[in-house]
Amino acid sequence: MNKATILTGITTTGTPHLGNYVGAIRPAIAASKDDNVRPFYFLADYHALIKCQEPERVRQSSLEIAASWLALGLDTANAVFYRQSDVPEIMELTWILTCVTAKGLMNRAHAYKAAVADNEQGGERDADKGITMGLFSYPILMAADILMFNANKVPVGKDQVQHIEMARDIAARFNHIYGEHFTLPEAVVEENSATLLGLDGRKMSKSYNNTIPLFEPEKKLKKLISKIKTNSLEPGVPKETEGCTLFGIYKAFATPSEVAEIRRRYAEGIGWGEMKQILFDYINDHIAPARERYEALLEAPDHIEQQLQEGAEKARAISIPFLREIRKAVGISRISS
């Protein structure tokens, strides 16, 4: 049986938060234990350079993300767990793909269009002011991440589906010119894993500085949950679950029957203070065992590095011969043996 290849990466620009866990880490951990798939997971440290020019932050984030995945039970015997920068073939493939990628395709990338819109709304005469080539062309690097290992399926949030479509376009263009080399990847969007909202009611994101770190110590976790923005409805007044940050986070962790019970409590007018306490207790109980393992791993960076190096060896056993094939396809090879 041909196993499906699944690939996921997390950018190393901050501390893993509840949104990362629900959207990417939790399903990845489950897939890492599935013998019917071939899972690839990586620390996207080159992607980090696009929006973070603080070297120590990138280093610390790499440590924290790797420790998080391992603490939560990633099966590194079945999964290939590696650091993007430890597989240099990805960067070479990025350039090769850049040479077949239409600029017009990159012009349509959401992140680039948003940056241009911000400049225009700010009255800038140059719509491209402050926009680096890293930001403009990073969908090509993402395509190289995916196509290097011919991933069949890429779990993403709805906001990332466009990048998978771009990877398909780039792969199809390459295949048209040089022959069939790349599998066309498919985006896998978990409809049930809604995007979590952060402390201020916007999408939980490092960019908004509104996150709840996954392994925050107990007292800090409680303090952050108490800061979650709510409306001013008094206890006893029925409340809407739709668009409520507290309910959204609870729903992402709890069982269907537990969610149904809290939905009933909302209709009865549960007080915000009580709901915050319920949410804190539930999340704290859920992550406490992994938090202990995480803190122990942070004290053992050599073990984390060993895991990443072993993963890089497994990744390069695939990337080195495959890039040799791609080089030959495009005409980059020795003139004589």
Image (spheres, rainbow, N blue to C red):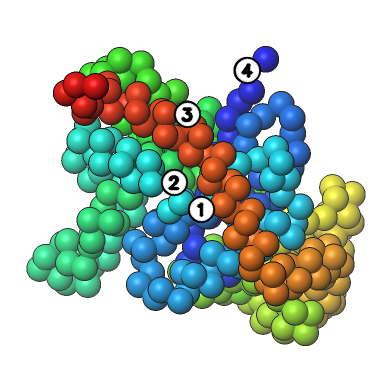
Please give the residue where the numbered disc 4 appears in the rendered image.
2
Count of picture labels: 4
Q: Is residue 53 above or below residue 42?
A: below
Report if the CB atoms under discs 2 and 1 are less than 8 Å apart: yes
For badge 1, the amino acid type reads Arg
- The reply to whether the C-beta atoms of the residues labelled 2 and 3 are less than 8 Å apart is no
Q: Nearer the viewer, residue 68 or 86?
A: 86
Residue 87's label in the rendered image is 2
Left or right: residue 90 compared with residue 97? right
Pointer 4 and pointer 2: residues touching (CB < 8 Å)?
Answer: no
Amino acid type indicated by mark 3 = Asn
Sequence order check, earlier mark of 4 and 2: 4
- Where residue 204 sits: x, y (%)? 56, 65
Q: Which residue is mark 3?
A: 150
**Mark 1 lies on residue:** 83
**Could you say which quadrant of the image residue 228 lies in?**
bottom right
